[in-house]
Image: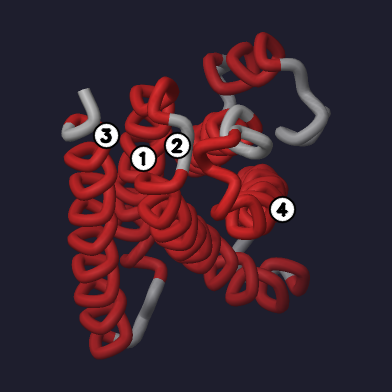
Amino acid sequence: MDTTATQSFGGLLESVAAKTPAPGGGAVASAVGALGAALGSMVVAYSVGKKSLAEHRGALEDAAGRLDNARTILLALAGEDAAAFALLTQLRALPGSDPRRIEQEPIARAAVVQAPRSVLAASIDLLRLLESLAPITNRHLRSDLAIAAVLGEATARSAAWNVAVNLPLVDDAGERGALESETARMVADARARAARVEAACAGEQ
């Protein structure tokens, strides 16, 4: 099966819609974040070289590279999430006494929990970058920048759901509680950053 990064958009939609355990919500969350990063890249592309933004050229060129990197990371995480869930599903189909399941299931369980945590962290990084771009990008693309932020927030909230649904895989109660608290803090941060980007964009209308 094609990875998320190499599939056509239509192919990805077909894969998500299919009656298969993966790709699912985790891969979709990452793909949405990648779309947000791509939209941010478009905003920057229309800002670099603009005379009124000449003083920000260095920051914009740096942001262009960081947005490309964010898109790459999020697409890679989409593939990792799908692969981790597919492996865990495969292992759970084996008898409990199977040596492969005994050896690999703890690793697969940890990967399934870690994948959405990584997506959540990546979404915060994306939103932080988008927030920094609000005052230094082409005002004619303010709706695109706002939409990029909305998608970044959606990625964070979606990733949080994926963390929550996989928490039963964490045996230690203290660790589960810490993950819940961490996730809640990060989602609140994402909401606040997206709101500030939207407010900055709305203020330019």
**Is disc 1 in contact with disc 3, using a CB cutoff of under 8 Å?**
yes
- Tell which circle, 3 or 4, labels the residue nearer the N-terminal end: 4
Rounded to the nearest angstrom, the CA distance separating label 1 from label 3 is 10 Å
Kind of residue sitting beneath label 2: Gly
- Quadrant occupied by the N terminus: top right
Question: In this rendering, does residue 204 appear at all?
Answer: yes
The circle drawn on residue 190 is none
SS assignment at label 1? helix
How far apart in space, not on screen, are marks 4 and 2 (Cα)? 27 Å
Question: What residue sits 67% from the left and 36% below the top?
Answer: 49
Residue 10 coordinates in the image, percent (x, y)? 66, 9
- Which residue, given by chain and number where applicable, does mark 4 sit on? 65
Task: Give residue 201's mark.
Answer: 3
User: Which mark's residue is nearer the viewer, 2 or 3?
Assistant: 3
**Quick one: label 1 or label 3, which is nearer the N terminus?**
1
Question: Quick one: SS at disc 3?
Answer: helix
The tag earlier along the polypeptide, 4 or 1, is: 4
Q: Nearer the viewer, mark 4 or mark 2?
A: 4
Q: CA distance from mark 2 to mark 3?
A: 29 Å
* Picture layout, residue 34 above or below residue 20: below
Q: What kind of residue is marked 3?
A: Cys
* Amino acid type at image mark 1: Ala
Mark 2 or 1, nearer chain start: 2
Instruction: Residue type at mark 4: give it.
Output: Gly
Q: Left or right: where does residue 43 sit relative to residue 104?
A: left
Closer to the camera in the image, 51 or 154 = 51
Q: Residues within 10 Å of mark 3 (few under 14, many from 20)?
A: many
